[in-house]
Image (spheres, rainbow, N blue to C red):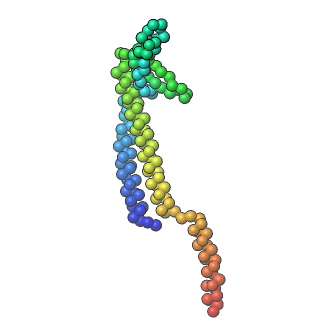
Amino acid sequence: MDRKAISDLRQRIFWLREDRKKLENSLFRPKKMIRASLVFLPNYCGKKDCRCKKGFPHGPYPYLSEKRKGKTRMTYVKKRTLNEVKLEAEEYARFQHQLARLSKLNEKIRSLFEQIRDLNCREVEEYRKVLTERKKNIPRQENEKGN
Ligand SMILES: [Zn+2]
């Protein structure tokens, strides 16, 4: 067993757990969120002779873009609610980003634990070899006793 390697792995896990603690703390008390992202899209009214028909669309206007059952749904955002909705969408994005970081950290920590496992772990193949070696050695030992 490589003690230096295991000690290094423990150290790395220790620091990752510190990172994870900070990350988890940042998730404990989120502000209000809305499950969507805020996007700004041009609009084409469809009226004849309108400037949008000639390649100069209206807007851009704010929409909440959300995924529902694999489809994207757009909801127009009224101007007087724009600031509130913007903050909520930003908080949602932040939260999602931190959750993704948490998954990555957990994966890293898991993989380091797997390395510790592997450094402490022998294969059955090795055990089988030991058994065969013993079988080979037993008759000889008995012979030696006999002599
Ligand atoms: Zn138009």
Q: Residue at x 35, y 15 (%)?
A: 80
Viewer-closest of 106 and 52? 52
The quarter of the displayed image where residue 104 is located: top left
Residue 67 picture location, percent across and down: 50, 27
Farthest-out residue, bottom: 147
Q: Residue at x 38, y 34 (%)?
A: 94
The quarter of the displayed image where residue 76 is located: top left
Q: Is residue 132 above or below residue 36?
A: below
Residue 123 picture location, percent across and down: 56, 64
Farthest-out residue, front: 54
Q: Is residue 74 left or right of residue 144?
A: left
The quarter of the displayed image where residue 79 is located: top left
Q: Residue at x 44, y 22 (%)?
A: 64
Q: Residue 77, can we see it?
A: no
Viewer-closest of 63 and 5? 63
Q: Quadrant of the C terminus?
A: bottom right
Viewer-closest of 54 and 95? 54
